[in-house]
Amino acid sequence: MSYVDEVIAQVVEKNPAEPEFHQAVKEVLESLRPVVEQNEELYRREAILERIVNPERQIKFRVPWVDDKGQVQVNTGYRVQFNSAIGPYKGGLRLHPSVNLGIIKFLGFEQIFKNSLTGLPIGGGKGGSDFDPKGKSDREVMAFCQSFMTELYKYIGADTDVPAGDIGTGAREIGYMFGQYKRIKGVYEGVLTGKGLSYGGSLARTEATGYGLLYFVAEMLKTNGKDLKGKTVAVSGAGNVAIYAIQKAQQLGAKPVTCSDSTGWIYDPEGIDVALLKEVKEVKRARLSEYAAARKSAEYHEKKDSNDHGVWNIKCDVALPCATQNELNLDDAKALVANGCFAVAEGANMPTTPDATEYLQKNGILFAPGKASNAGGVATSALEMSQNSERLSWTFEEVDGKLKGIMENIFHNLDDAAKRYGHEGDYVVGANIAGFEKVVNAMLAQGVC
Ligand code: NDP
Ligand code: 2IT
């Protein structure tokens, strides 16, 4: 059995009931085959693959809090500190009822390579809880966040591990967590990113993942002789990533016509009204049906079941999945190809199933994997860390300009890596190899640790 296959088998055996983690490990290790074959003796002796698939540390803890009725609720908190070869652990906190250890491990594993691709000194980590902020009062969210941080603070710090937002964790949650960290530790430091602008946040961090996705897409299209002007874009999700992806797509001359949330989706052939979408999702925290109620051109479709990914049936040139993992399956991929879509770029983490990815690539679709195309969020988090360290704030234009440069660099690095190993145009292989190379060099230099 090859070294790659041996390690994949070990991961499946030793981490039962973690299908998303298996999926992420398989995708990465499969595409590293050419690199591993060239260095097999060294990697085996140094147990590089065994080390890279085993988190340095995983923390699981109880999060008790009191709801508005006086009832004590108990959630489970997680932080997986996956790999610190190139910098302090860095990665978001997901608050969603579907969170379990396997989900956090898949996200933490992906984060190692994503963070490496940014070219900035950040290691890989991820955390979160099965707490659902939806339908909770601000006081309940604060009670949860304070309890969560009362345990998490022991393991994080500006030079050790710097969490941030992800699904369900936005500016409100980061604010409550930062306040609690400061109160317990008595230290004012950049321990979280995605902070509010009045207490150490960076301009453009809110926009960064969505904007970065579009900067990446623009560069990928340009290299392939295409552009975004006048193109129809299908987007899923209606959260942080989706909203700013839609906004930047419009600024670049494209027309995004869809978005979705966990209960339904919108088709707006005249183009999504971003101001209205922000009002519904960011201010009112309401359902997308309210968007349709306020806009004549929009159709609202109730989601039939969890497999109903209606947005991918809308005719588009470019598709941007920006909601959650495995939200674009083989049937969706077939519908996109049949409708003439020519590029798919992942704003979410692992939104495309492996068979859908394969189908898209085999049919000549330009496919951008999330660990490259959504890296703008964490890259800008690293820029927030830099600003906190030097106790200065940069202008929006400065941060946005750096973000654009970082995304263009990421594209060319993975394009080059794919070419070096004879996989021209396969950006999945390119991203995994380019992300892996830097981490492995650092691991080898640091000895057995
Ligand atoms: P948000 O919580 O802001 O938005 C998530 C959106 O996706 C919401 O519209 C939500 O619907 C929808 N959604 C979430 N889970 C499901 C589900 N199980 N089924 C259907 N719809 C769902 O999160 P973000 O926009 O921050 O994150 C979206 C994706 O992007 C995630 O995969 C995340 O890991 C990834 N990502 C985020 C980054 C960031 O900086 N925030 C950086 C890089 C990647 P509803 O409104 O009903 O909750
Ligand atoms: O998946 C991701 O890259 C994020 N949720 C952002 C992480 C960060 O530290 O900004």
Image (cartoon, rainbow, N blue to C red):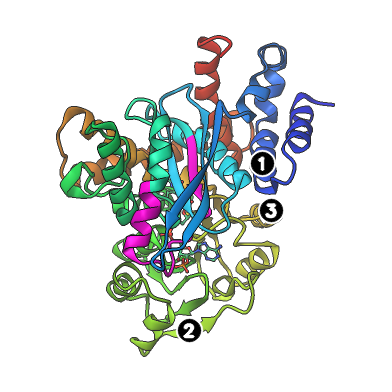
Q: How many marks?
A: 3
Tags 2 and 3 in contact by the CB under 8 Å rule? no
First to last magenta residue range = 125-146
The residue closer to the viewer here, 244 or 307, is: 307
**Label number found at residue 27:** 1
Find residue 1 and report its image quarter: top right
Above or below, 146 against 402 in this view is below
Residue for point 79% across, 34% down: 9
Above or below, 64 against 270 in this view is above
Say which label, 2 or 3, has the lower sequence index. Answer: 2
Estimate the x, y position of residue 163 in percent, counting from the top left. 39, 39
* Pointer 3 residue: 362
* Pointer 2 residue: 300
Residue type at mark 2?
Answer: Tyr
The residue closer to the viewer here, 412 or 96, is: 96
Q: Residue furthest front?
A: 70
The residue closer to the viewer here, 103 or 67, is: 67
Q: CA distance from mark 1 to mark 3?
A: 16 Å
Residue for point 48% across, 48% down: 63
Q: Quadrant of ligand 2?
A: top left
* 10 Å crowding of disc 1: few (<14), some (14-19), many (20+): some
Find residue 406 and report its image quarter: top left
Q: Under tag 3, what secondary structure? A: helix
* 10 Å crowding of disc 3: few (<14), some (14-19), many (20+): few
Residue for point 25% across, 39% down: 183
